[in-house]
Each structure stands twice: as C-alpha cells, then as structure tokens.
Amino acid sequence: MINPWKTYDGPEKEIHSVSTYCLAFKKGTWIGGEAYLKKIEENKKPLDQRIGRYFDRAITLLEPDEERERQVALQFKHFCQNGLGELLASLPEYEKLKETDYICLYLGEPQVSLPDYEQVNNRYLRDKLFNTEQENTTPDAEDRVYGTSNFFNGYGDKKPFLLHQTAPFGTNAARNPAASGISSRISDADARWLNDFRLLADRNQRILPNPLPVFVDADELNREVVAIFNEDPALLPGYREIMERLVSGGHDLNNYYLLFYQQREVKDFDYVSRFDIRLRDEQQDTNSWRVQDLFGINQTLKCETVFDLQTQVLKVVFSNALVQEQKSGAWAYKYFDDIDPKYCSATTFRLVMQYRKAWYDFVYKSRRQAITPAAWRDILLSGLRDDVAATDKYAGYRAKQKLNIYLSLNHLFDSNNVNFTGHFMPTYLPELRDSLGRLLADDAADQHLATDEDYAFAAGQLIYYLLYQSKTEDKTNELLEPFLQKTNDALFKDALAQTIRRYKHAISFGNRRFRKLAEEVLGYEARKTPKELLAFILCGYFSPSGLFAKKTEKPEDAAAESQASETNETEA
C-alpha cells in the first residue's frame, strides 16, 4: 500500500497489501491476536471476516476481458477465506512471531507470474499515487494523467480554511472543470518516480549521500557523482568527498539542487546557484581562514575549505553538539537530527537549534550571508559565557579556544568589526596588552586609561587578579560570571569594589601595580555598558596577567608574586 488511507480494507486498514494476488497483515490482527480480540469485544468484524471484501475490491484492478486472471484471484480468495487459518496453525514458525510481525502470502507460478503482479500494481499506482482521484485529469493524447502530488503533500478538500477561495488557478479547467481550483499538478509518470524514490531511500538510510547534489542539465556530472559514490561500497563517500573530487577534476560546481533526505523525510531541497568550496581572507590576502593562538593554548587552525571550517571550527564553537568526531574517526553532523538536550548545556542546545540551519546553508550552499555579525557574536559570546560558568577543569581551555576563534575570524563575518567597536582584534589585542604594560610601568605616573576598550581590558585583568586571591583549592572561572551579568557601569564597579574588600587582606600593601590598576579602573567613566564591552573584559581576563610581571618593589613581594606568576602560567 502507498499509505494506510489507500488500502482495500477501509475503514479498518488492517490488510496492507493491495493486490489480487497477495494478502499481507500483522499477526496481531489474525485469529487469537490482541487486535483481533479487541475487534471481537467491540462487536466489529475481525480480519478473517473481511478477507472477501478485500478481494472483491482488489479484483476491480482487473480488466473485463481478463477472465483467466479473475478466476485465479477468486480461487486465491477462497483459499484465504477457508484454508489460511489451518495453514498458519500448522507452521511452528508462526508461534515464534511477534504481534507486530507481518504475514505475507503471495500466489506463485504457474497461476501468476511477475508480469501479472506488475500489471495489477501499475493500475493501483496510477490511481492511488495522487493525493486524490477526484482532481485527476482525463488521459491526454499521450495517455498521461495529471493530478495532485502525494509526495509529502496533503489535500485539504475537507478543510475549507486550507483551500484557495479567490485564486484563479486551474490550467486544466477546460478538460476538467471540476478541478479548476488546483494550482499545480504532476503527471502519473512523475508520481511513479517519486514513489520509487521514496521506497528506495526508505530501505536503507545510507543508499544516498546526504546531502545529494543533483545538477541541472548536466548528466555527465550526475553520472560522475554516482560513480564516485559507488566506487567503494564500504566507505560510501559523502557530500564532502564528492564535491572535493569534482573540484579536483576541474568542474565548476553551480546550478544544482541539493537534497537532504533522512528518516523518511525530505529535510531540505533547495537550489544552489554556485558552490564555492574555498575560503579566502581578502583582508589578510590569504587563501585560507586562520585562527591564531592569541591566548597561549598552543593551538592554531587553518581552514582552506568550508569543510575544514566545519570540522575544525564548528566542532569547537558548538561544543561537539553540532559536529562530532566519533571514536571510529568518522564525522557526525547534526543539522537535521534530533538532539537530546541532556547531553549538552541549555545554552549549547539553544545555539544549535537556532543557528544550525544557517550554518548548513553557509557550508553546503555557499550562502555566506547566512551568518550575520549579530549571529556570530551571539554564538561565540553565549558559548564563552557558558564555558565561564562551567566547573570542569577544561572549561578555561574551551573558553580560550572560542576566544581565539572569535577574535581571529570576526572580520570574515563582520566586515566592519562592529562586534569589536571597529577594531581588528588580532592586531588590536597586542595593542591593548602593550597599553596596559605602559600603564603599570614603574615610570607611568602620567599614564591613564584612555578608551573604553582599554578600561574593559584592564577590568578583566583586575577581576582575574582578585579572583586569583581566593583560597579555594579547585579554582574555576565560575566566579567571573557575576561580573558579566551587570547591566550598567555603576553596578559593574560596585561588584569590583566589593570583591576588592573581600580579598584586600591577601594583597600586599606595597603592590603598586595593583593599586594603580584598581584606581584607574574604578575611576574611569565608561561611555559603553559592560554588555557592549563584554568581549574586551573577557580578553583581559584570559590574557596573561600584567600584575604578575616582574617588578622592582619590595623583595619579599617580588618572591611571592614570582611564585604566583609561575602558577598562573601553568594554569594558562
């Protein structure tokens, strides 16, 4: 059957075959089964009493002159009505079946042959492959029938609010005036192709690459896609391998449809005018996107293609929830899969669900505009705050990974660097560090914070130094989170002042650098809010601390701070 609404056993829908030569049903609907007994309790006809009605409807598929076939079908009907129960009871294998297992009976040779089955099935499909027979056109000169598509489409004839009330549809109104309210139809041949595709794809989830490029007016390219996919049945290359092979073969990848079919659903079917596999950084004049190591984690990334970006960057950005490297070495991409929120944080789950379609379009359809500056900021800053709030020992490393990515690639999504108040961070971050160094130098009496960015960076440094004074054995960055929640500068400074009072006993009275930094930060009047300066606060917090640098104050303080510096470097 095509679906339960197109059987010959309506309204019960328990016989799922649709042929004069076949009978198929689940064990639970047969004599003694749970569904069978329920029918008896409800005073309804059980399946064995409806077999005659089923065959009477199926026999209508035969033509009037096919008398031999009709007699064969009647004999099969008689056997199923009178001898099937005894046959099943005699089979030891029958008792081993579960209630949901199918029992399928086929009438074999010499009574009928495979062409007989095909002929009957073709007649069933010609009528039933459309949504409804009521809107079918009469056969044209080529014996083609046109109707409403049943491929992932419904028909709302029983729901007036789904119908067009005023649209002038109906190109076939002259041939079928009753069908003039239909906007479009497909041929019975196309309906058959769609049904064959559905049956094929549903048998094996890996029978097609996901997604699958279908090139328009390019049979040679389509044949090459099939050849690449079938080269090694054990590997079954995916979209990445196919497109990389086509690019290496000198093909321009444009003008194709992209199909993503998964779990009996068309997840995506869209036109791609041009696919650009390469990543070029025009501002840096490089043929790759590069993530610099700005926070001392000994990791740099180089992405030459969108697929490198997917496995190297998106894996980190979404904390392994969207792109996963499995133990086998294979990659799993969760663009359309169900994601269990218990295996990731609430923030990560929200980011994946909100932005994964945009990233899918970015990677697979070259829609670079899909990721806006605001989206890029939300993804990275939300992920950073999530790592800051985490308590595991790797949270700080993950935060620095995301900061490296955020600062290094921002200009590629945000051409004017609006997210960083117009600054190109790979070069501006060293300037912030140098500026802080000059501020804390021994001869820096006349040096002061000059910009909001300097202030936010210095505040991040001060926060780290204060929280470092905590006597907690297992220090985490979780203590930073309350500062990041402040909505205005006054509340932010109040939190700083309270933290200074909390840890003042642990800070040397002769620590000139600390006094200088605290005075400058608490005395600066920022024009921007802490939220607008959040990225700079984080940069200051995760940068090497200028307060642990070598200094010329009291010898006893120098020894203590030298030890603290070594600890800080180890943590970094």
Image (tube, rainbow, N blue to C red):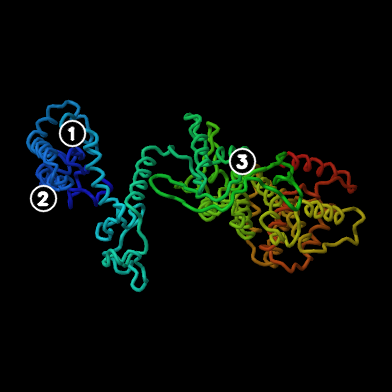
Identify the residue shown where x is 50% and y is 34%.
Answer: 227
Q: Nearer the viewer, mark 1 or mark 2?
A: 1
Q: Secondary structure at mark 1?
A: loop
Q: Is residue 203 above or below residue 453?
A: above
401 or 105: which is nearer to us?
105
Looking at this rendering, what residue extends furthest in the right direction?
443
Along the polypeptide, which appears first: circle 1 or circle 2?
2
Percent position (x, y) of residue 245? 59, 37
Percent position (x, y) of residue 506? 75, 50
* Neighbourhood count class around disc 3 (C-alpha, 10 Å): few under 14, some 14–19, many 20 upward: some
Quadrant (top left/top right/bottom left/bottom right) for the C terminus: top right
214 or 566: which is nearer to us?
214
Q: Amino acid at mark 1?
A: Val
Q: Is residue 524 left or right of residue 18?
A: right
Residue 455 found in image quarter: bottom right
Q: Is residue 421 left or right of residue 246?
A: right
229 or 334: which is nearer to us?
229
Quadrant (top left/top right/bottom left/bottom right) for the N terminus: top left
- On residue 112, the disc is 1
* Neighbourhood count class around disc 1 (C-alpha, 10 Å): few under 14, some 14–19, many 20 upward: some
